[in-house]
Image (cartoon, helix red, strand yellow):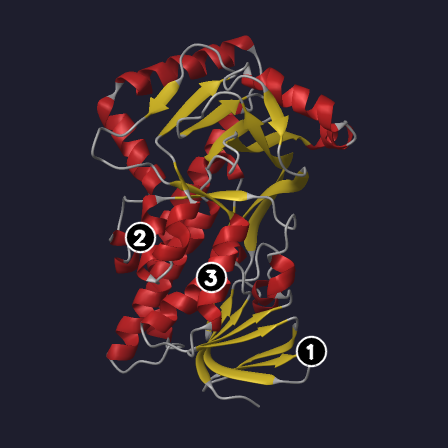
Amino acid sequence: MTEKRDLVILGGGLVGMTLALAAARHGIASHVVDKAKPEDLTAEGVDGRASAISTASWNLLTNIGLKDRLDPLGCPISAIAVTDGMKPGRIDFKPEPGEGTLGRMYANRDIRLALFDAARAEPLINWASGVEPVERERGEHGVAVTLSDGRVLEGRLLIGAEGRQSPTRKEAGLSSATWDYSHRAFVTAITHEQPHEGVAWEIFFPAGPLALLPLLDLPDGRHRSAVVWTVAEKDARGITALSDAVFLGEIASRMEEVFGGVELAAPRMSWPLSFHHAGRIVEHRLALIGDAAHGMHPIAGQGLNLGLRDVGALVEVLAEGMRLGLEPGDAQVLARYERWRSLDNTAVMATTDAIVRLFGVPGRVPSLIRRIGMAGVQRSGWLKRFFMDEARGMSGDLPALLRS
């Protein structure tokens, strides 16, 4: 038996560990449990993905003490270009001079390393890695989690942060709206002749989009971008079997030499894509965050940012409730968290799904209609401003940790 803490967080990934650190900044102590060992999660080549960190999410990471560690590792996103198959009628989202960037691109590995180093130095975080929960109990006066090594961790509130297949969500009977997109995302990185100039490209095709996301140049000066290529699941096996040279040729043909000649700069990985959205994200002494609560298509790069907004809202309601004498598992506290996150989560999920379906309609006429609409957005100052604020994550009722 170990000491009783405020939170027992099941899942020590990007969102779960950010929650532990953010909570600690408010004096809230936690147990963090993850079945993976940190050295395995941060080994070279284990996770080749990169994430777009919005302005609001960067504020959160700054406010929990990670600015100095992460600042030199991120590549600013100075603009976003959206196009339907590289045809005329694209949208260019670019802030006015002095308005800052639209976000930053980070390798997931770099974020993990920063989070894990900070967690090791934080006395309010008790980190149990390489073990799994075998029993979860949510009683009237607290929660208890029995681990596979026999330890029992006690707390006042259980947090489900294990990702899309969250066993905690399933055990609690919190159902989700779920569907399969029949898409698979291939993830890698490329080097290229021409500089990206901080521009993120989203090139839409009926079978799925190709995203080119700016990364920092390599030490030898080569320009570099992350690639997320979405294809139909029925074609995925054939694409997996392609040689690196042919695979690269397929990407290059879709880019139409935007960056000149290209070369692969990272291993190829792939993941199936699906949608799930939990109708409720709290239960008795339980709250869900991140992908345990909602999982979306990566088309808009908002998955991690949505999870970090969960973190900011949950920490704020917990801290305010505890100042009023309420414990973390109090039903009033959890109800406020659910109300706060419900509208934002639903709106982002619905918008992302609509974009996937809109650009997935094949044919010349649908493409023409889309491009006419995109040209209209390009000419509309207020619409572009709205979409840029959404990309930055700076719209709506933001938690204090994400505001500045």
Q: Amino acid at mark 3?
A: Leu
- Give the residue pinned by disc 2: 59
Question: CA separation, marks 1 and 3?
Answer: 24 Å
Q: Earlier in the sequence, mark 2 or mark 1?
A: 2
Q: Which residue is mark 3?
A: 115
Q: Quadrant of residue 141?
A: bottom left
- Which residue does the image show at 48% across and 44% down from the upper left? 51
**161 left or right, relative to 147:** left
User: Residue at the spot x=37%, y=70% of the render?
Assistant: 23
Q: Residue at x 61, y 16 (%)?
A: 253
Name the spot of residue 328 as percent of width and height, x first: 38, 77
- Mark 1 or mark 3: name the one nearer the start of the chain: 3
Q: Residue 100, image x and y in percent?
A: 26, 37
Q: Furthest residue to the front?
A: 220
Location of residue 189 by image quarter: top right
Sooner in the amino-acid sequence: mark 2 or mark 3: 2
Q: Which residue is mark 1?
A: 148
- Distance in Å between CA atoms under marks 2 and 1: 36 Å
Residue reaching furthest left? Answer: 98
Residue 97 on image: x %, y %: 21, 29
- Is residue 241 at least partly visible in the picture? yes
- Secondary structure at badge 2 equals helix
- Residue nearest the observer in this picture, 223 or 180: 223
Q: CA distance from mark 2 to mark 3?
A: 15 Å
Q: Give the amino acid at mark 1.
A: Ser
**Label 1 element class:** loop
| Mark 2 Cα-neighbour bin, 10 Å: few <14, some 14–19, many ≥20 | some
Judge left or right: residue 380 versus residue 354.
left
Q: Which mark is residue 18?
A: none
Residue type at numbered disc 2: Asn
**Residue, x 23% and y 23% (percent of image)?**
381
Locate residue 117 relative to residue 151 in the image: left or right. Answer: left
